[in-house]
Amino acid sequence: MALLLLSGVLTAVLFLCYHVSSVPANLRHLPHIPILPLLISYCKMEAEDVRIKKLILPFATQKKCGVVVVWALGRWTIHILDPKIGRKVLEDLAQYPKERPPDDLLLWRFIGNQNVLMRNGDAWKKHSTLINDAFNNTLPIEQFAALAEKAFRVIGNGESVVQWDNLAQRFALDAVGSTVLGHDFNALSTDSSLATDYNTVMHSIANPLYLIFPPLEHIIPRRSLVAKMDNVVKELTNMLNLKRESPGNDIMSFMLRDPEMSDEELRDNMVVLFIAGHDTSAGALSSLVYYLAMHPHYQERARSEVLSVLGPHSCPTANTLGATSLPFLNACIREAMRINTPISYIVPRTSSETTRVGQDVLPANTSLIVNIFAVHHNEDNWSDPFEYRPERFLDINWRKDVWQPFATGPRQCPARNFAMYEQRTLITMLLREYEWTLPRNSIHKEQLKNAFSPFALTLPYNLDIKFSKRPSSKVL
């Protein structure tokens, strides 16, 4: 009897493995990447950019295709590498709405689905209009500048080695706290308990076993992780309740003025703005400082431009930080966001019916993922795509259609202008105050290394930077 039961269990497991690993019949007409190297990559906890460089891009180049079928997070999805197909999918909201993600992944439970990221149709329009209006009415350069000064106190007046990815995250957390959530995390001065809990949650969600086999959440539930995740959401909700009693000049206070926004919608939008507002910014700032450290001639050229426009001490403004005022610096920012895109791809789209885009047939009810990192590294779109070359963005004819760090179409990031000014403010002030290089023993001396992330975030880790105070500057 025991042997019969064991045989039954093994048969069920083998059937499940076969079912999970087999490409669905409706996708077999498209080129698909073998599952084994993908599984190995997840087990090794390789970052998303590594998988794209090692597996997806070479495969697509070999097959000469603009779409490939890729296994990820327990299922097969269509990755779109062709920017023309990608634009079609991202711009046609009626034909390709956002997909409701599987319920068995904790990362989606964390985000929620009653927010601007996940909703469709009229509900999305309501969220989008409100959030776009909020960001269009807010450009807090003075707050960014004040936070930059606090960051400089951490770096110091002499020569120091700083874990820049950590400092960038703390800067970004204080920035999103003060300008979006209306809360002072004081992360640049002290250890934020919320940030610690959040980082623990994100690291734990990224357990490769649960990402490879999501139903494991029901078989071996991670109750302590769920409790910690709920505690992070509870802390954010408490901030929201305080906002109701004492509104300020921030994004969430603006959203609270809308009587039609439910508590769940406000909560889910707050979580999305918290994650997107500081993780993506921290990744972008880490990458930018890294590439300027690796290319001192670009760093010096950007510094000369900043000093010629802003001088050594004047406060940055919207005019002096504009793309036309600092063309080379903005080229450096754009190139860093291209080569190490803050988020590799966005929430999947789907279609209720089979569609043809170019030569490709996209089956109904299938996850469609526009792979932004792949678009940014496709040799058909960019010359020398793996080289950091800001000059490409000084060309008046640079490919605006294939630069998509904020996505494209009606649902592109509503905070894109906000995010660009956050980077411009910090980096202009940093260039005036310091020169920086990589330490000799840096793990990034050959190439930038990113952490493993279930959200496809591109986050450099253990990025030490050696800062030297410039003689003509002084931390106040």
Image: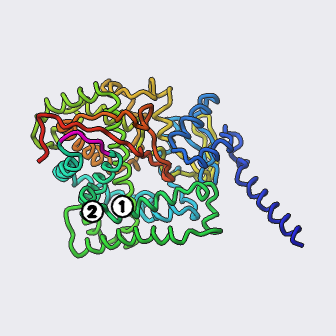
Helix, strand or loop at label 2? It is: loop
| Residue labelled with disc 1 | 195
Residue at x 32% of width, y 43% of height: 285
Quarter holding residue 123: bottom left
Q: Is residue 171 left or right of residue 287?
A: left
Going by the numbered disc 1, the residue's amino acid type is Ala
- Looking at the magenta stretch, what is its main secondary structure? strand
Quarter of the N terminus within the rendering: bottom right
Q: Amino acid at mark 2?
A: Phe
Residue ID at (16%, 40%): 319
According to the image, label 2 marks what residue? Answer: 185
**Secondary structure found at label 1:** helix
Where residue 225 sits: x, y (%)? 50, 67
Is residue 161 rendered magenta in the image?
Answer: yes
Name the foreground residue: 211 vs 260: 211
Pointer 2 local density, CA inside 10 Å: few below 14, some 14–19, many at least 20:
many
Gap between marks 2 and 1 measured at Cα: 9 Å
Range covered by the magenta-colored residues = 158-162
Q: Quadrant of residue 245?
A: bottom left
Where is residue 421? Give x, y as percent. Answer: 25, 44
Determine the residue positioned at 35% across, 43% down.
284
Q: Who comes first in sequence, dot 2 or dot 1?
A: 2
**What's the mark number on residue 203?**
none
Q: Position of residue 90 (x, y in %)?
A: 47, 45
Q: Are marks 2 and 1 in contact (CB under 8 Å)?
A: yes
